[in-house]
Amino acid sequence: MKNSLVFLLISLIGLSGFVGILCRGGGLKKDFYEKSCPHAEHIVQSITWKYVACNSTLPAKFLRMHFHDCFVRGCDASVLLDSTANNSAEKDAVPNQSLAGFDVIDEIKSHLEKTCPEVVSCADILALVARDSVSFQFGRPLWEVPTGRRDGIISRASEALANIPSPFFNFTTLKQSFANKSLTVHDLVVLSGGHTIGVGHCNFFSNRLYNFTGKGDADPSLNSTYASFLKTKCKSLSDNTTIVEMEPGSSLSFDNNYFSILKQNKGLFQSDAALLTDQGSSNIVDEMLNSKNFFDEFKQSMEKMGTIEVLTGTSGEIRKKCTVINS
């Protein structure tokens, strides 16, 4: 009987679709909270949109937070945990020290705990907030977020350093970093398009202006006019507080402009410029110059990223507060 059912499913949806059902984000599903907390996703969206309406820098912050969470132990909200006397958590690792928006997550969690105690995970909240914040300008969801994630109970700063792709990475290292999370070069290029919103701190790219090879030189792959502009913002290698738009002039609007900027050699980070150093990834950059292509592909890659190493079923826990594990 079981074999007959499997055969029927394969014949109806095709082998690749069937394998996808079995393997991608196993345990996650659409409307996971339909019975246990029917208003959960509406609560997340309404509070998120309330804050984004007043602060248009938040979408970039939440997108980055979700990305940094998923690359360390999977999408388990480990990035939300505070450090303790005995442990330095992901939140305090160098790549995460500029993360912001935790207060919004906490407010959403507090509201959900009053509505449906110990039901909605912090991991699902973060995945939904990332989607809803970026989607605010369009008034509709840009990608699907199947739910059912559970929260991790381990968070180590050292693992954040080891797993989060660095803005200093070259193409080979970037490719390997994404492959470690079962993401392809295509996902790498498409997800890099998230840099169409947000800012970068000078200390993560000023070596490209002042000391690229250790000889006081500039990165020859960086547009010289753009480099001159960046030098007016970042006056020295030691500046670690000044921020610069990742996409000059439109860092608050989510679109595919990032790829046009990239083609002009105005990618802010070394990891941006690296996408043009490989023929395969460079070809994908060209494909993303078409807005429809970008939005279609970003949707798929975000859905894929949101299922990295998720905890489901009885794994992990449902934290009562996102900043601490349950005692």
Image (cartoon, helix red, strand yellow):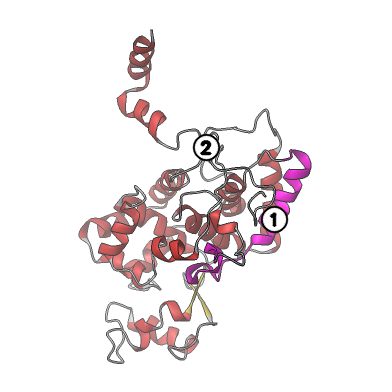
**Which labelled disc corresponds to residue 312?**
2
Q: Nearer the viewer, residue 21 or 219?
A: 21
Q: Is residue 242 above or below residue 129?
A: below
Q: Position of residue 12 (x, y in %)?
A: 37, 17
Label 1, on which residue? 106
Q: Is residue 148 above or below residue 217?
A: above
Quarter of the picture containing the N terminus is top left
Q: Position of residue 35 (x, y in %)?
A: 67, 28
Q: Nearer the viewer, residue 25 or 47?
A: 25
Write the residue at 43% across / 49% down: 298
Question: Magenta span: helix, strand or loop, mainly?
Answer: helix
- Mark 1 and mark 2 lie on one chain; the one further toward the N terminus is 1
The reply, left or right, for residue 70 in relation to residue 190 is right
Q: Is residue 62 above or below residue 183?
A: below
Residue range highlighted in magenta? 88-117
Mark 1: secondary structure: helix
Mark 2: amino acid: Thr
Write the residue at 52% across / 67% down: 96
> Neighbour class for label 1 at 10 Å: few (<14), some, many (≥20)?
some
